[in-house]
Amino acid sequence: MLTLESACRNPERHRVLTGDRPTGPLHLGHYFGTLQNRVRLQDAGVELFLVIADYQVLTDRDVADRPAVHAENLVLDYLAAGIDPERATVFTHSSVPALNQLLLPFLSLVSVAELGRNPTVKDEIAHSRQAAVSGLMFTYPVHQAADILFCKPDLVPVGQDQLPHLEVTRTIARRFNDRYRTDLFPEPQALLSPAPLLAGTDGGKMSKSRGNAIPLGATEDETARLIRAATTDADRRIGYDPERRPQVSGLLRLAALCQDRDPHAVAEDIGSGGAARLKAAVTEAVNEHLRPLRARRTALAADRGHLRQVLRAGSERANAVADTTLAEVRAAMGSV
Ligand code: ATP
Ligand code: MG
């Protein structure tokens, strides 16, 4: 099993791909779930690809209107968090046509029943507020396989919700290699952080599209307002018990991650102070932790041209890699 430490020890042996959907600003769930690991791997010298999965946003009609703006803002969040465009390749799915050509052979390698069983697709469908499930939504994990496998990474830093998707990618890699008697694709492994499923202000998975997120780029006042509106319970004695008190425990965990402490210790400090003291402590911890990132973000936001340039350069590099892989796939399949 690959760990962050082992990958960082031998950076030249690894390649990482990971990404986000441009459905809104990045939040603390991304930051503690995958973004910190991406930056650590990059800083250790591991080659990093970041895909902004803009075509996947077409599955959410209510937010499909501004993916290009969201994509630029994702770049802003990445750079503020420490992604270095000189070392990492940041690109949008839509700017790399070969990805969609990988999709058809990949679709032939999975059954409809397998896609129907995918728990993350089921969950995303349940939250999509759509009357009918589109073919695009249903085949989501297969697009993701193309987005991942084109650059043949061995490691994918993701949150826990992505594990079933990554399993589909691994299956596709294995079946492609078996069917065409090749070793073209590695079976990439997931890299989970210690916070693989950070809770939002309602106690459920923090998500851009569920109205429960604390964006990295929020102001300190907005952060305070979001945390003040978080759901808690009536017990004034604050304790860390994720099973019985998911909302209070989610908030404690957030403060603990920001302060690099144990959530039980954070709870001890608050004692019988109730939800108001808990929320004040969490707000302070989050704002304190994010202050340097937010300062960098504000400075970077002044130059939108630079953000677009990062995407252009990333897209050029990703296209070169994807075209090579597509040629190899065609050769393996015996077609030209
Ligand atoms: P959406 O609501 O549009 O699906 P999202 O907030 O779930 O947005 P994604 O772009 O789908 O964000 O996910 C990007 C990456 O961040 C994935 O690897 C995902 O697992 C991870 N991630 C998202 N939310 C969390 C979270 N709350 N805790 C840990 N990791 C997360
Ligand atoms: Mg998601």
Image: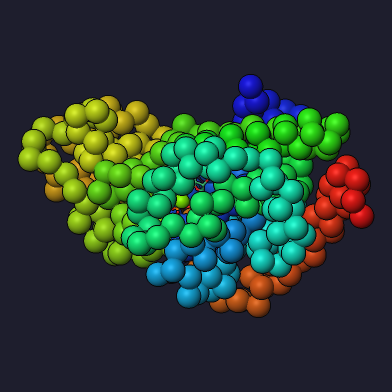
Residue 147 left/right relative to 20: right
Quarter placement of the N terminus:
top right
Taking the spot 37% from the left edge, 62% from the top edge, the residue there is: 130
Front position in the image: 319 or 206: 319
Instruction: Name the image colouring.
Output: rainbow
Residue 51 left/right relative to 178: left
Please provide percent x and percent y for residue 61: 44, 69
Quarter placement of the C terminus:
bottom right
Residue 80 left/right relative to 202: right
Residue 49 left/right relative to 58: right
Taking the spot 20% from the left edge, 55% from the top edge, the residue there is: 228
Total labels: the figure holds 0
Taking the spot 87% from the left edge, 50% from the top edge, the residue there is: 330
Front position in the image: 315 or 177: 177
Q: Is residue 126 above or below residue 55?
A: above
Please provide percent x and percent y for residue 173: 72, 36
Please provide percent x and percent y for residue 33: 48, 42
User: Residue 155's quadrant in the figure?
Assistant: top right
Please provide percent x and percent y for residue 49: 70, 50
Report whether residue 166 is seen.
no
Report whether residue 193 is seen.
yes
Q: Residue furthest front?
A: 112
Q: Residue furthest top?
A: 1
